[in-house]
Image (cartoon, grey):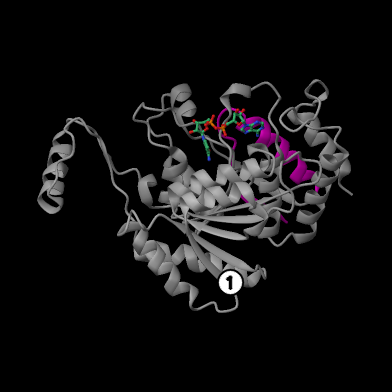
Amino acid sequence: MSYRVTLIPGDGIGPEITAATVRCLAATGVRFDWEIFEAGSEFVNRTGRPDPLPGELLDAISRNHLALKGPLTTPIGTGFRSVNVALRQALDLFACVRPCKNYPGIPSRYQNIDIVIFRENTEDLYAGIEFQSGTEAFGEINGLVAGYNHRWLRHNSAVGIKPISEFSSRRIVRFAFDYAERLRRRKVSIIHKAEVMRLSDGLFLEAARQVARDYPEVQYSDLPIDNICDQLVREPEYFDILVLSNLFGDIISDLCAGLIGGLGVAPGANIGTRAVVFEPTHGSAPDIAGQDKANPTAQILCGVMLLRHLGEIAAGDRLENALKAVLQAGIHLTADIHPEKAKAVGTAAFADAVMAALF
Ligand code: NAI
């Protein structure tokens, strides 16, 4: 039997790290039938196709319920909307789950970190509802703001809208608490800025407090985003599960990746009721693309998450242990985590070492 999974190699380093991951997954003996699709701005530029997120790709993920995805580039300031965000919204992949824990051999300023981030994926300033300065739409919004808030926005402003619904807030918080109960985690912390964004973040916080009452066995805390930035840098080992709205979740994910040794080692999953898309926290790293320099650890860990999601627990454990063995040995490491950059190996050689360590 083989598992049919949609594969999106992605842009930049994506094809290199997904190829490495596909080889490692094959070496576990679990069989996959990959349905490969391209997407994103590089795909549009190369093929002249109008849509960076082709309908057939969405259909395939909906059909297979599973995808392994490399990073996709979002050009800044071109008006090109993020395909990553559009994909999460189109499939209602409401929870972005990002485990951040220390691995042996990966240099980090901190030890004993084991944090799981739950980022709400569909709302907030990330929802992509923005209005350009000088447009008729902006004028109408400015009139509304003046009518309700008795103040005018500067006329050359652009405006972004931050929608936070009770439904989505409750859904992500409940999802995190269910995970905590299932995996016997000790504590859930809700992160917000409700003292300033009293209505939007206030709603998120109130929904979280209500949901938390249904989980008396799990310790609950809530704290402002600025406060947790300070605490995460001073004593990250204190934290367990973090639940955040979309933008804060994006930023804190990178911060936590930095705590455990960098973006190259932080995997993630975008989870909805109909599909799960596994993708690393990092982006397409155009600065090292096509040079066999990228660290495939995060993408391989996405493969580990995929195996476990499929119930292939033994294969997932074997692959994670092989990865750990290679990291701990400290010889076949990529440049981002190698203590002696001159001795670093490439993406493909790193994957070879992981495969050789599988037993
Ligand atoms: P990035 O995460 O691609 O790179 C930041 C830094 O980390 C760079 O110096 C890069 O070389 C390094 N890095 C990242 N992954 C690495 C790996 N696996 N091995 C070794 N080094 C690694 O962030 P950046 O440069 O801000 O974004 C580049 C593009 O990626 C942008 O277009 C952005 O929109 C997109 N992006 C896509 C994401 C996704 O597909 N989910 C997530 C984040 C960014």
Residue 214 on image: x %, y %:
50, 78
For the question of whether residue 268 can be seen, the reply is no
The residue at the point 76 percent across, 54 percent down is 316
Residues 142 and 237: in front is 237
Determine if the magenta segment contains residue 9: yes
Residues 187 and 15: in front is 187
For the question of whether residue 228 can be seen, the reply is yes
Residues 157 and 284: in front is 157
Drawn side of residue 138 relative to residue 243, left or right: left
332 lies above or below 165: above
> What segment carries the magenta color?
1-28
* Quarter residue 337 falls in: top right
* Quarter residue 291 falls in: top right
The residue at the point 33 percent across, 54 percent down is 197
Count of numbered labels shown in the rendering: 1
Drawn side of residue 103 relative to residue 186, left or right: right
Residue 343 on image: x %, y %:
83, 23
For label 1, count other residues whose C-alpha is less than 10 Å away and answer few (under 14), some (14-19) or many (20+).
Answer: some
Q: Residue tagged by mark 1? A: 219
Drawn side of residue 9 relative to residue 129, left or right: right
* Quarter residue 289 falls in: top right
**Which element type, helix, strand or loop, lies under badge 1?**
strand
The residue at the point 49 percent across, 26 percent down is 42
30 lies above or below 343: below
Drawn side of residue 278 relative to residue 106, left or right: left
**The N terminus lies in quadrant:** bottom right
